[in-house]
Amino acid sequence: MTYKQALDWMFLQLPMYQRQGATAFKKDLTNILAFLKQLDFPEKQFKSIHVGGTNGKGSTSHMIASILQEAGYKVGLYTSPHLKNFTERIRINGKEIPKRKVSEFITTHKDFLEKQQLSFFEMTVGMAFWFFANEKVDIAVVEVGLGGRLDSTNTITPEVSVITNIGLDHTQFLGNTLPEIASEKAGIIKRNIPVVIGERQIETQAIFIDKAKSCQSSIVFASDCNENYTTDLLGSYQQNNTKTAVTAIEQLTGFLISKENINKGLLNVVKNTNLQGRWQILQKKPKVICDTAHNKEGLYYVLKQLQKEVYEKLHIVLGVVADKNLDAILPMFPKNAQYYFCKPNIQRGLEALILQKEASKYKLEGMVFSSVKSALKNAKAQANQDDVVYVGGSTFVVAEIL
């Protein structure tokens, strides 16, 4: 099977939660356990950190992986769902699983998968564990898909179990109250394995304390930590996640991780884990950066970060959609840059000539180009090795160059 054939086949298989909802949720680990046996128990061949919770588990997983990478370890990262490409779900040191490995895996195990009627998520978890074991990762950070107790990822015995917080989400599967949901998510707590809870919540803390006690596991609430950390993941809401990630690292034994590794890991999450379109560095000389920030709040943080870059000259490839409030965003852009105005290739895209005219009111000067790719090509041609090129203004602009 080709990669495309393998992927098409996977998407057509029994339920995928993102596509089908409730019918995709299996309250049973029988299938994934049978599959892992077929794969010769890959989940027993690498160490792991298990990350669950209602919100922030993806960001927290990426932060933990980044810190471990800064300490020099080979780190697997399993997250869901994917944004652009299926391969985003399975990474090692930020690199996605090769497409040929996906097709090889599905081709090899297709008969078993059909016979057992595994869901999309079950076969993807099996693939991730197989890949991590084969590539001999030092440790893998595994994000829970949904819930905890009966999630396919709950077949690992981790070094640390992490639960970020509890909110009223997926109530049709997990329960209608916070304590009920907490009980499901507490299912990832294992005997004698340290537990980190991101946020101390009055309604749920007793559930976790009791579960940890019954498992003879130590428990720490990250929100009790008074120290604040800085991360390159933008948004003040990330502060809770940084505390959770650092507390998880502190509970990890047998790994040498310095304070510097923690600080650098949190500051280099995007670079280390290869998140798409979030302060993504496309090349180094000249340095080309793209970001999907497109509203006033998002651009505020991104342009602040751009100010910290060291360069001889700044080049900005800029395109926006027609309904954008230009008077709100254009004053935020630096005047000491050369602009390359373009129109994203969608119906909603604002004509580059109009953007140029409006930008000139705020002393933002530059040329007009027929496409995003043409604008970027010209910016790179004009830039010297020590310059910085920034591409942004719209998700659609960034999508055309990724």
Image: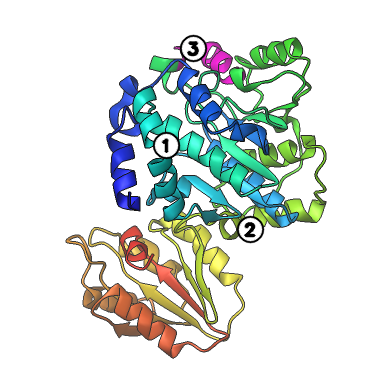
Which comes before the other along the chain, label 1 or label 3? Answer: 1
- Provide the secondary structure element on which disc 1 rests: helix
Q: Residues within 10 Å of mark 3 (few under 14, many from 20)?
A: some
CA distance for labels 1 and 3 = 40 Å
Structural distance between the alpha carbons of marks 2 and 3 = 37 Å
Where is residue 269? Give x, y as percent.
60, 54
Mark 2 vs mark 1: which is more N-terminal? 1
Side of 95 relative to 367 (left or right): right
- Label number found at residue 78: none
Assign the C terminus to one quadrant of the image: bottom left
Within the magenta stretch, is there residue 42?
A: no
Asked whether 312 or 264 is in front, the reply is 264
Q: Which mark is residue 109?
A: 1
- Which callout, 2 or 1, points to the residue nearer the camera? 1
Residue 303 seen in render: yes
Q: Which labelled disc corresponds to residue 177?
A: 3
The residue beneath circle 2 is 268
Q: Quadrant of residue 47?
A: top right
Secondary structure at numbered mark 2? loop
**Residue type for callout 1:** His
- Residue range corresponding to the magenta coloring: 174-186
